[in-house]
Image: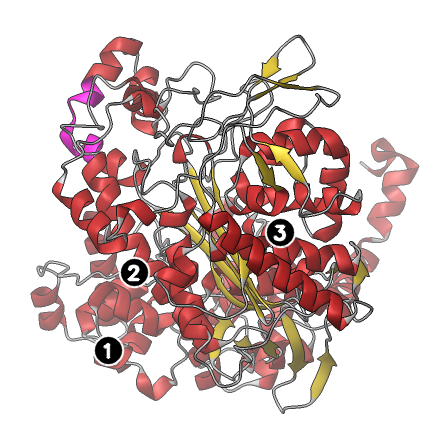
Amino acid sequence: MRERLGPAWRRLAAWRWQWLVALPAAGGLYVLLLIPFTPSISDIRKAKLEQPAQVLTADGKELAVFKRSNRQWVTLDQVAPAVVQALIATEDHRFYAHHGMDWRRTLSSAFYSLQGDLQGGSTLTQQLARNLYPEEIGRAASLNRKLKEAITAFKIEALYSKDEILETYLNTVPFLYNAWGIEMAARTYFDKPAAKLSVIESATLVGMLKGTSYYNPVRNPERAVQRRNTVLSQMVKREVLAADEFERLKKRPLRLNFERQEVPTGMAPHFAQQVRKWLIDWADSEGYNIYTDGLVVYTTLDARLQAQANQAVRNHTRTLQAIATTNWNKRDGWRTDNPLVQSLVRESAAYAALREKGQSEQAALQALLQDKALMQQLRQSKTRIEAGFVAMEPETAAIRAWVGSRDFATDAFDHVQQARRQPGSTFKPFVYGAALEAGISADDQRVDAAVEIALPGGEVWRPSDAGAPSGQSMRLRDALAYSKNTITAQLVQEVGPTKVARLARNLGVRESALQAVPALALGASPVTLLEMANAYGSLVRGGAYRAPWMVTRIEDRTGKVLAEFVPHPAEQAMDEADSYALIDMMRGVVDKGTGRDIRRRWGIQDDVAGKTGTTQNNADGWFILMHPHLVAGAWVGFNDARITLRSDYWGQGARSALPIVGDFTHKALQRKDLQRHARFEAPADSAWWHRWGSSLHQQWQAWWLSQAQPTAPQAPQPARPGVQPIPAPQPAAPAPLPPESIEESIPSLPAPAALPPPAPNDALDVWMEQWSAPDAATAPQPDHTLYPPAVLGSPRQAP
């Protein structure tokens, strides 16, 4: 036989005893080499004592806790004994006898698995190791993973008692529906604490551990009952449950009392999400873990201002929602023959599902249009008013309040930092600021005349206002106060859209792309509310830009300061004198222009300045207000820009967004720690007599204009490059903007404004109008911004 094997095989056969020694030695060496790649003793201790980061407001109120999961830790004596009995009987009945690995169970599992009957052989300690360290140990069904799992189990057994291991296991195991640990599982599935779980309830939860989705008692109740009875039979086998009790219990139904566990949102969930993103980067660079190291993070947010912001958004969006619901009822806007409604149905997941099943486009559409439940759900989601609000301290760019949506649980999309929408006339101050930088004075005049601006490709842009042009000369400060599109369009051609875009970027619009085209002057390029509010804050800072500031300091769990943060360095973006001159122009918006409800309705008589904004077809309403110590801005609209309030009155930024800012600012200025009577300060190098004379001149000019009688229109000024004034008509009373004057720039979809407007005598609109504006003659005119369809793209939509 040896002769036939050959020399090599004969040598191997001679070494058979050496192989019997070498193979185990090699295996032992491999295990030793794996040890450094398993969790260390300190890691295990940290997991046992992990503390999530706690985020606080500037005044010490809890804002958020960054947990790994929705889990409430309970001690073993706070868990029903039946849970422990069921767990040990089913998962590891020799738990108290082994030291991390059950060799008998491991060898038995390997034997049956080689025969094709796959069986698990992990002890509770091994399962705990895998649950605590999924990345270090891995999930692959391999020998390497099993060895890492066993090594880590030995380490855990060396550190902790059996009861501590059981306690940790029961508090870390997942149970679906955002519930981790036995306490949250008991509350989720049976609406009771873990201490009060019955035998049958304990068996149900322990049974889920074999496969939480497969044995989900909510979705798969029959499987859950079968698995529960298997657990009960194991308890009988291990003599912790009587046989007659098992016979009685196995026939009982599940009797769930299911309640999904939601993640706590806190007072400012969108702001907390921004802090979390920033904190993860900081912790990674500094060697900390936000989930385990007990960090205490102090932010710039003010709890009282945040509460006022939440209330202002909640109150005024509720009013607007009532209007939207009325204007989009089944008899009026939300009709099955409305092309927009049909387009929304075609974009739904239900429509895609019917098309995948083979239904034709028309058949699928008609089937869904007749589905009352689906149409109601679609109408509610699409016509839901949304809002964003942010307040900042202009001196430091510190965030003081942040409301990303009406309800984080319903819509987690952040309308402060994520949503990019066309800003409308709130972008105009950058045009006038660029004009000031070019040497043009706020008291220079331009003619309010219709204009035509030639665009590349032979197209012509004809920006217009709600009313016909007056044909009269108007000071630039008044043109900004009354938000005149015609004069703003002339001005952007004088200074150039590139300079306007550059100034906006320098002041704070740094993340959104700005197209250097004439329509930029009227807010054509989508931006975020945070960018706009911070850019206005730069004006209050004398033209100096600062990045938004969110975190002031970070401490460890003992109170030791790990890091402190100061406001970001300032970058001079605009001349200080020009910045003050622009603020002085924007005072006119709230003194006599489109934002005068700030003084008339909300009674704010302090030194403030701001700007309203309304985009085409009233899709977006904006308002941003500046005070020397507070900047507040709001956006209101729908996630889908094709949906509007269908009201030229309520769709204006002065009616939709301004009340939120007015309500908030009125309450904020009542605080004793805010110098409400502070004034915007002119640059130090401006002589006092010059400031006094300028103020006196402005007051006299305002009085003279209020007394002057209408005169014949003046001749337009000579044409400027690229601007063609059209002969002005005779002065006429402002007329409301026709709904069809300019169509939406959304291809292949009809403009929502094409739908019939609500009846003028609608009871809700009449009541709202009387409540908000008792004197219709003094109501501000609509602040519309009209764009050339060739220039604009669709606003970024919320997911």
**Is 551 situated left or right of 503 in this image?**
left
The quarter of the picture where the C terminus appears is: top left
Mark 1 neighbour class, 10 Å CA radius: few under 14, some 14 to 19, many 20 or more? some
The residue where tag 2 is placed is: 315
Residue displayed at 8% across by 59% down: 251
Inter-mark Cα distance, 2 to 3: 25 Å
**Is 282 situated left or right of 248 in this image?**
right
If you read the primary sequence from the N terminus, does the residue marked by circle 1 or circle 2 appear first? 1
If you read the primary sequence from the N terminus, does the residue marked by circle 2 or circle 3 appear first? 2
| Callout 1: SS | loop
Q: Which residues are magenta?
A: 367-376
- Residue 157 inside the magenta-drawn segment: no
- x then y, percent, for residue 761: 14, 36
| Callout 3: SS | helix
Magenta span: helix, strand or loop, mainly?
helix
Q: Amino acid at mark 2?
A: Asn
| Callout 2: SS | helix
Q: Is residue 295 above or below residue 425?
A: below
The residue where tag 1 is placed is: 240
**Is 508 situated left or right of 160 in this image?**
right
Give residue 661's quadrant in the image: bottom left
| Camera-side residue of 716 and 376 | 716
User: Can residue 515 be seen in the rendering of this structure?
Assistant: no
Inter-mark Cα distance, 1 to 3: 65 Å
- Residue 375 inside the magenta-drawn segment: yes
Mark 3 neighbour class, 10 Å CA radius: few under 14, some 14 to 19, many 20 or more? many
If you read the primary sequence from the N terminus, does the residue marked by circle 1 or circle 3 appear first? 1
The residue where tag 3 is placed is: 531
User: Can residue 603 be seen in the rendering of this structure?
Assistant: yes
